Amino acid sequence: MDVQNKFKGVKVFFSGVIVGIVGVLMYFQLYPNMEVVERVEVKYKTITQTKYLTNPHLISVVLPEDTIQIPADTAELIRKYVTIHKAYYSRNIYQDTLRFDTLGCCVLNQQVTQNRLDSIKYSYSLTIPEKTIYTVANQKNSLYISGLLGKDLAAPLLEYSWGKYSVGLGYNFMNSGALVSFKLKLH
């Protein structure tokens, strides 16, 4: 009778092991062993450059109004002519700064003489973001089924591990005793 109970216990044990293996396989199908983490890193690259344009192009011309007032006094006319002559032949230098939201700026230096754009010098400083995505696969918690065989030892084990720690439980059928294990990963 005692042998029959042992045989029945072994049948129950192996049925439990088969159910456990199927459960573990389903677990690993639903929850893979790797956890994917995406880390986004943004670096800024600064570009600075100065360029000279030697031949500017005419874009548009604005003509003055048609009405002209001629003063009766010639001294007034000569004074206006000298003022216009100086304004026409003088070299005017204009500087303008264009800002590009968060990217940087451009500085324009323009020279105008005889009502024409003589030269343009521009320099810019841009800060361009470069986006890098790192994908890292971290090992998740794991569940293992194993066994031990030896002299006076036949034991299935169920082991759960997380990080560098692992805990296991088992049952030795030869000596009818429980097994407990604790593991620590060294590196």
Image: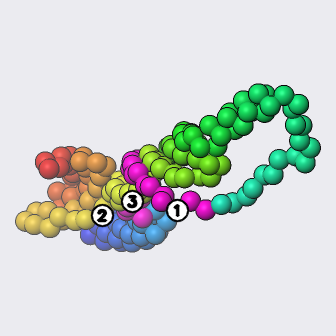
Per the image, the residue denoted by label 3 is 135
Image position of 56 with respect to 123: above or below: below
* Cα gap from disc 3 to disc 1, whole angstroms: 50 Å
Disc 1 or disc 2, which is closer to the eye? 1
Q: Of marks 1 and 2, which one's residue comes earlier in the chain?
A: 1
Give neighbour class at mark 2: few <14, some 14-19, many 20+ (Cα, 10 Å): some
Q: Is residue 83 magenta?
A: no
Give neighbour class at mark 3: few <14, some 14-19, many 20+ (Cα, 10 Å): few
Which element type, helix, strand or loop, lies under badge 1? loop
54 sits to left or right of 59: left
Q: Is residue 45 magenta?
A: yes
Q: Which span of residues is magenta-colored?
A: 32-57
179 sits to left or right of 49: left
Per the image, the residue denoted by label 1 is 55
Image position of 90 with respect to 40: above or below: above
Seen at 31% across and 49% down, the residue is: 162
Give neighbour class at mark 1: few <14, some 14-19, many 20+ (Cα, 10 Å): few
Look at label 3 and name its amino acid: Thr
Image position of 117 with respect to 86: above or below: below
User: Which mark is on residue 145?
Assistant: 2
* Cα gap from disc 3 to disc 2, whole angstroms: 30 Å
Seen at 51% across and 44% down, the residue is: 109
Seen at 44% across and 55% down, the residue is: 52
**Can you see residue 126?**
no
Marks 3 and 2: CB-CB under 8 Å?
no
* Cα gap from disc 1 to disc 2, whole angstroms: 80 Å
Q: Of marks 3 and 1, which one's residue comes earlier in the chain?
A: 1
**Can you see residue 116?**
yes
